């Protein structure tokens, strides 16, 4: 017996030792890919020494004797810290994710092959100006120099993810950077999805009720569109076809609620306390670990530039030079149209055009799938654009038999000069130069906010489609692709894009709100991203005669919900302080306690308060109850509340109060009744999850920022190491925006927000500040993986200085890249 015990003990100890050895070995190989920032290296591709000085926050400050060498250094730094992220974005746009992830990503690859963004990027290389072409070549050499260093020095394959998802890391090319700009355009575009949703909803409700559930921004004309069912008969009207479920984290497609947002605002010198212009910008994107954003400074021959970049793209997309600051917000320009193409009944390889039947432009593409057989996809294009299957954008729900759907989109341009325009903006010395430089910008359309020493301006950049004034749906719903009046007629000249310079008020701001009133087809868009945040911004701006850097930071971090301040007095008007005090422990007592808290609340979506959680849960339950009986399964597509819709209902605007009545019920319900029922249901759900002590509920417990790793975030053993979770304030309609997921079981998780914040003060440029949502490194073992995220959560910033001595002070490392020999 003793002998057996000894052998068992030896076996257990041996297994433990072997396990420990395996852990040490894995850690050793994974840790090898953490970059060493103090190094002197001889590399191919530079003409003179390049210095990459990483300050205490690991922000690279890149110095070289020529612009090409500086862009080489930027490519090297991007690849050092974000090689996995860059290669995954490249695989995405190339439609090659399935080579690594198998059938899981086949649907995404198929869409990317059909759009052919990578092929269009390849042809766009020749369209770049000479300066940009040279920068792209140099940047690619810098990325490839790091890839070569990984191979030569056994740097752990460059990132730990490559051990789990092996695959060839091919060399970078200029086309790859252009392709990533097009990928960004796809992530920020949702007009096609909105067209489909409007068409589907119009099949369910009347025109009057359609205006309620999909309300226009104030000022839009009220002329009715044709009924979609009349344009294309034989479509289901009962919502039986389910809506598309939430996308895979690896998919670049975003639901309309997450397809781009941002804030930017600026003050002229006479509205600034220190007499210099001010500019603030916080672009909003899906929160991931690492952040899509990467801070960098490049010292060009024309001067230093610092701010936020996207790894893989050699641009400072939002930032400043010594003379100019610029920021971006999504313009929501209607630059996509869905067309319904009629197939020839005698020959399905042909489609109908204004001139008769014509053959599709057709080719085949092979998608290689890990551990599965390759899949061959037949790609078809019409004169309107690529044909998309019904499985994408829920197109099957709006495409009648004998037809297919195609997509027109400004980003489907094979001579795309967006990157050249971005480079020219970055090199501009004043507002006027930057506006001229932006003419070559194609997609994604953006609001470009500008500030120099003297003035401020807002310019919409990006191609604006020219539609016929007789267009049957005005681009708001899918239209017949064979009618000439529906087809695009090119794009409007750049001079047609809205521009605002040196406003008399001395202030400019955009929160994705409607910015002007113009008739179709110069309208820019019917769909805008905000009607609430802009009201709060205007209030904050009007409370001060002059502004400072700190007042701009205060506005950027403001968490008061104008939507809550508007809706609660309407929805709870007949519930507040009504009836006698209910006995403790009853549903009525719980309701009264919640209403008392809301009555004393100022609308601040503070993470430490229970009121934001009660309000958010109530409004979510209320909207669902308002629309479920009319829309059926289609109600699941409305994942986020629309404050304008709820306000219309409770004000009974144009008869919108009809939504309160349950259609299937034999009695007529009122809005007060449905509001109370929704509140009781919301409180029941919250009690089951957070307990019965209402005052102890915290918005931050539900509104956690989910910076999840796109590939490893769902892996049980690894997600605790690679995902970053933080309790956060803000909400769907606050300036410090934290958009909720809208999906059960965690509908209030913060999944979309400001991955980058910057505030630039031209009275004292080196006092400018910025921050990103995670850290500079994409390596989970690096201390810079999440160090900036802690500051971001607390609303703190780091300095934005172009002083080289400040960059060197306390640097975490200096990498010197030397030419061979």
Image (tube, rainbow, N blue to C red):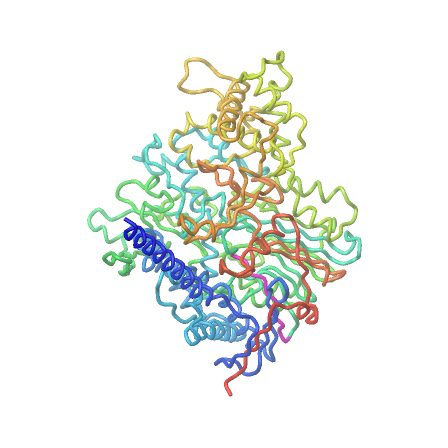
Query: Viewed as shown, does residue 388 lie left or right of 543?
Result: left
Q: Quadrant of residue 151?
A: bottom left
471 or 126: which is nearer to us?
126
Q: Position of residue 121 (x, y in %)?
A: 42, 65
Q: Position of residue 720 (x, y in %)?
A: 47, 49
Q: Residue furthest front?
A: 2
Magenta span includes 294 = yes
546 or 148: which is nearer to us?
148
- Can residue 117 be seen from the camera position used here? no
449 or 751: which is nearer to us?
751
Q: Position of residue 569 (x, y in %)?
A: 63, 25
Q: Position of residue 806 (x, y in %)?
A: 70, 68
Query: Viewed as shown, does residue 700 lie left or right of 537?
Result: left
Q: Quadrant of residue 448?
A: bottom right
Q: Compared to 401, does 436 lie above or below?
A: below
Magenta span includes 703 = no
Considering the whole magenta stretch, tell me its main secondary structure: strand
- Can residue 630 be seen from the camera position used here? yes
Q: Which segment did they paint magenta?
A: 292-301
Query: Viewed as shown, does residue 670 lie left or right of 770?
Result: left
């Amino acid at each position: 017996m003793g002998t057996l015990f000894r052998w068992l003990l030896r076996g257990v100890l041996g297994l433990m030792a072997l396990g420990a050895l395996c852990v040490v070995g894995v850690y050793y190989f994974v840790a090898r890919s953490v970059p060493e920032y103090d190094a002197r290296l001889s590399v191919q591709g530079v003409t003179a020494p390049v210095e990459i000085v990483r300050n205490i926050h690991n922000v690279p400050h890149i110095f070289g004797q020529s612009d090409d060498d500086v862009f080489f250094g930027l490519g090297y730094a991007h690849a050092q810290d974000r090689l996995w992220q860059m290669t995954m974005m490249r695989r995405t746009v190339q439609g090659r994710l399935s080579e690594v992830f198998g059938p899981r990503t086949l649907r995404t690859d198929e869409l990317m092959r059909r759009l052919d963004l990578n092929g269009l990027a390849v042809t766009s290389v020749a369209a770049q100006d000479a300066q940009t072409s040279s920068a792209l070549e140099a940047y690619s050499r810098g990325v490839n120099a790091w890839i070569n260093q990984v191979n030569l020095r056994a740097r752990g394959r460059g990132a730990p993810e490559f051990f789990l998802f092996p695959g060839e890391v091919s060399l970078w090319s200029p086309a790859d950077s252009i392709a990533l700009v097009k990928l960004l355009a796809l992530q920020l575009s949702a007009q096609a999805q909105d067209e489909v949703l409007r068409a589907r909803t119009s099949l369910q409700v009347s025109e009057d009720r359609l205006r309620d559930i999909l309300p226009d921004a104030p000022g839009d004309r009220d002329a009715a569109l044709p009924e979609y069912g009349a344009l294309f008969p034989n479509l289901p009207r009962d919502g039986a076809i389910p809506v598309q479920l939430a996308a895979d984290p690896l998919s670049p497609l975003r639901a309309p609620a997450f397809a781009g947002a941002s804030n930017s605002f600026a003050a002229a010198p006479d509205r600034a306390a220190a007499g210099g212009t001010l500019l603030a910008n916080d672009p909003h994107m899906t929160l991931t670990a690492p952040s899509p954003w990467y801070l960098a400074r490049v010292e060009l021959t024309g001067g230093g530039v610092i701010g936020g970049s996207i790894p893989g793209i050699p641009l400072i997309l939002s930032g400043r030079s010594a003379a100019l600051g610029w920021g971006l917000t999504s313009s929501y320009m209607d630059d996509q149209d869905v067309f319904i193409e009629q197939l020839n009944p005698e020959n399905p390889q042909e489609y109908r055009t204004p001139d008769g039947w014509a053959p599709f432009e057709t080719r085949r593409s092979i998608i290689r799938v890990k551990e599965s057989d390759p899949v061959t996809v037949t790609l078809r294009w019409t004169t309107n654009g690529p044909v998309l299957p019904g499985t994408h954008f829920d197109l099957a729900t709006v495409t009648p038999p004998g037809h297919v759907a195609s997509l027109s989109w400004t980003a489907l341009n094979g001579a795309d000069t967006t990157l050249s325009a971005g480079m020219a903006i970055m090199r501009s010395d004043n507002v006027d130069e930057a506006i001229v430089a932006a003419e070559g910008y194609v997609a994604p359309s953006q609001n470009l906010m500008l500030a120099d020493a003297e003035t401020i301006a807002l310019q919409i950049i990006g191609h604006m489609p020219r539609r016929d004034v007789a267009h049957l749906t005005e681009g708001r719903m899918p239209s017949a692709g064979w009618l000439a009046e529906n087809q695009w007629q090119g794009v409007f000249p750049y001079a047609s894009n809205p521009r605002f310079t040196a406003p008399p008020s001395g202030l400019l701001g955009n929160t994705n709100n409607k910015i002007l009133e113009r008739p179709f087809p110069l309208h820019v868009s019917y769909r805008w991203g905000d009607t609430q945040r802009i009201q709060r911004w205007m209030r904050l701006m009007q409370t001060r005669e002059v502004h400072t850097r700190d007042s701009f930071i205060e506005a950027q971090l403001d968490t008061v919900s104008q939507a809550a301040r508007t809706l609660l007095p309407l929805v709870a008007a007949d519930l507040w302080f009504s009836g006698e005090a209910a006995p403790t422990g009853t549903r009525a007592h719980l309701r009264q306690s919640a209403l008392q808290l809301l009555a004393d609340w100022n609308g601040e979506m503070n993470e430490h308060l229970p009121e934001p959680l009660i309000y958010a849960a109530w409004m979510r339950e209320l909207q669902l109850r308002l629309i479920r009986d009319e829309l059926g399964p289609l109600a699941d597509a409305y994942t986020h509340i629309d404050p304008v819709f709820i306000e219309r209902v409770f004000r009974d605007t144009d008869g919108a109060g009809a939504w309160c009545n349950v259609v299937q019920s034999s009695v007529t319900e009122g809005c007060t009744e449905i509001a109370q029922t929704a509140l009781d249901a919301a409180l029941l759900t919250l009690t089951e999850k957070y307990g019965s002590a209402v005052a102890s509920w915290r918005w931050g417990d539900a509104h956690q920022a989910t910076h999840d790793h796109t590939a490893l975030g769902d892996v049980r053993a690894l997600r605790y190491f690679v995902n970053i979770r933080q309790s956060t304030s803000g909400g769907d309609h606050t300036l410090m925006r934290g958009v909720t997921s809208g999906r059960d079981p965690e509908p209030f998780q913060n999944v979309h927000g400001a991955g980058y914040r910057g505030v630039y003060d031209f009275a004292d440029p080196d006092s400018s500040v910025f921050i990103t949502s995670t850290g500079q490194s994409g390596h989970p073992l690096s201390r810079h993986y999440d160090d900036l995220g802690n500051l971001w959560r607390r609303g703190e910033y780091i300095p934005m200085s172009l002083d080289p001595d400040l960059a060197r002070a306390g640097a975490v490392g200096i990498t010197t890249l030397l030419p061979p020999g």
